[in-house]
């Protein structure tokens, strides 16, 4: 045995600690958390190099997993395996090579379960806070970010007055403000009426309260 392998020699002679396996298992369990903590704390070029290394490791791991999955997946054998092709009674038959059907079945069941309770109406896309409210930074150094500018159309009443600009948390541009009136046109009669829209007054504030933005 080489001179520098004294640790291995000691292990051969005296064995390991009784709790060696348990300590090893716990250390391996802590490793991902330690790596994540290190990635958070590193700054500058060290962070870039470390993240690049982790990125390449993840790619390699995904490739390995994919390779193992492909080994077990369901594969069709080619129709022209033999010299003259398959006979007509074998054309629709598939040969399975260690088919990993279980995962495919689970995925299919999930899809069916999700589609079971679907209502046959067009889905309305949810609007995120970031899309509706644009952050407006104020102050001498532009560090204060408590103001929001509304990017969508808002409805206001006839007696609406804006707050002083300094204290206005939700800035609504005048171009996107609409009165709380509708302009429907009768199908048979040409004149257009402008009735008030019921329940639309202060709609913006109700919407903001739903999003838990107003205090």
Image (spheres, rainbow, N blue to C red):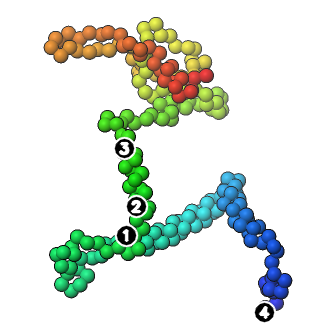
Q: Which residue is situated farthest in the front direction here?
A: 89
Q: CA distance from mark 4 to mark 3?
A: 67 Å
Q: Locate residue 86: give its quadrant.
A: bottom left
Residue under the point 23% across and 84% down = 82
Residue on which disc 1 sits = 74
Q: Which mark is residue 1?
A: 4
Q: Which mark is residue 104?
A: 2
Residue under the point 64% across and 62% down = 50
- Sequence-wise first label, 4 or 2: 4
- Sequence-wise first label, 1 or 2: 1
Question: Would you say the residues marked 3 and 1 are in contact, meaning their CB atoms lie under 8 Å apart?
Answer: no
Along the viewing direction, whichever of 138 and 196 lies nearer the viewer: 196
- Sequence-wise first label, 1 or 4: 4
User: Residue 155 at what x, y percent from top left?
Assistant: 42, 18
Q: Say left or right for 52 vs 198.
A: right
Q: CA distance from mark 1 to mark 2?
A: 10 Å
């Amino acid at each position: 045995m080489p001179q520098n392998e004294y640790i291995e020699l000691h292990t051969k002679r005296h064995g390991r600690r009784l709790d060696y396996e348990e300590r090893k298992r716990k250390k391996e369990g802590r490793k991902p958390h330690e790596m994540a903590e290190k990635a958070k704390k590193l700054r500058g070029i060290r962070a870039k190099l470390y993240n690049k290394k982790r990125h390449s490791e993840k790619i390699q791991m995904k490739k390995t997993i994919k390779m193992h999955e492909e080994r077990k997946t369901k594969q069709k054998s080619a129709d022209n395996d033999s010299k003259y092709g398959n006979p007509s009674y074998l054309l629709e038959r598939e040969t399975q090579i260690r088919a990993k059907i279980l995962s495919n079945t689970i995925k299919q069941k999930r899809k069916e379960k999700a589609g079971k309770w679907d209502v046959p109406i067009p889905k309305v896309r949810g609007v995120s806070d970031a899309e509706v409210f644009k952050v407006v930074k104020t102050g001498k150094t532009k560090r204060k970010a408590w103001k929001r500018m509304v990017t969508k159309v808002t409805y206001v009443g006839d007696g609406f007055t804006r707050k002083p600009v300094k204290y206005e948390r939700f800035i609504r541009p005048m171009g996107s403000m609409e009165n709380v009136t509708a302009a429907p046109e009768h199908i048979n009669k040409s004149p257009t009426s402008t009735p008030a829209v019921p329940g639309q007054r202060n709609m913006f504030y109700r919407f903001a309260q739903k999003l838990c933005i107003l205090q």
